[in-house]
Image: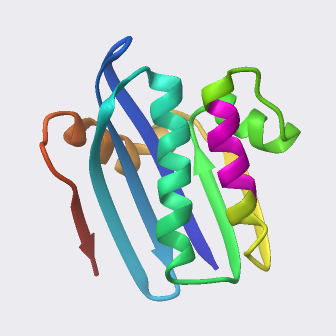
Amino acid sequence: MIELYVDGASAGNPGKSGIGIYIKGEGRQIRVSEPIEPTNNHTAEFTALLRGLEETEKITSGIVSARSDSKAVVSAFENEYVKNELHKEFLQKILMITKKFDFFFIKWIPEAENRTADSLARQAIHKEKSWRHEE
């Protein structure tokens, strides 16, 4: 089973933004810190989940447990609905990817339990290019 932790961060609304992805399981640990186009925090959170799923898809088609501290993202996935037009595009792509896994679920977690992804997202705000590390 793969555990996927994601977080998005913005310094402003909109402002400099970044995403953090932490993947662990099946003998792997992958950390991704990636700056994204200036945006707001909600869009950064959706971007983080989409990119995290893209990274996860490269290593498994099995069981994936995703965790996010964004209630908006988790709720949008669970209800398969979001009002914001931009976020609808993200949600459609997210739903398409998750159907490729044998089993996928997402869970909201408090910020305190998402520290690794949060730290990676905050670091990305101050970077010009992506950073990826696999153990």
Q: Residue at 83%, 43% (x, y): give it.
A: 78
Q: Quadrant of the C terminus?
A: bottom left
Q: Residue at 49%, 58% (x, y): give it.
A: 52
Which is more toward the observer, 108 or 112? 108
Image-based side of 51 in relation to 20, left or right: right
Residue 99: give x, y in percent of width and height.
Answer: 79, 68
Q: Quadrant of the N terminus?
A: bottom right
Residue 123: give x, y in percent of width and height.
Answer: 20, 41
Image-based side of 92 in relation to 47, left or right: right
Judge whether 98 appears above or below 129 on screen.
below
Q: Based on the displayed image, in which of its 4 quarters is residue 83 positioned?
A: top right
Image-based side of 85 in relation to 117, left or right: right
What stretch of residues is rendered in magenta? 87-95
Residue 46: give x, y in percent of width and height.
Answer: 56, 39
Q: Residue furthest top?
A: 13
Q: Residue furthest bottom?
A: 27
Judge whether 22 appears above or below 124 on screen.
below
Residue 133 is a magenta residue:
no
Judge whether 10 appears above or below 102 on screen.
above
Which is more toward the observer, 91 or 42? 91
Residue 6: give x, y in percent of width and height.
Answer: 49, 49
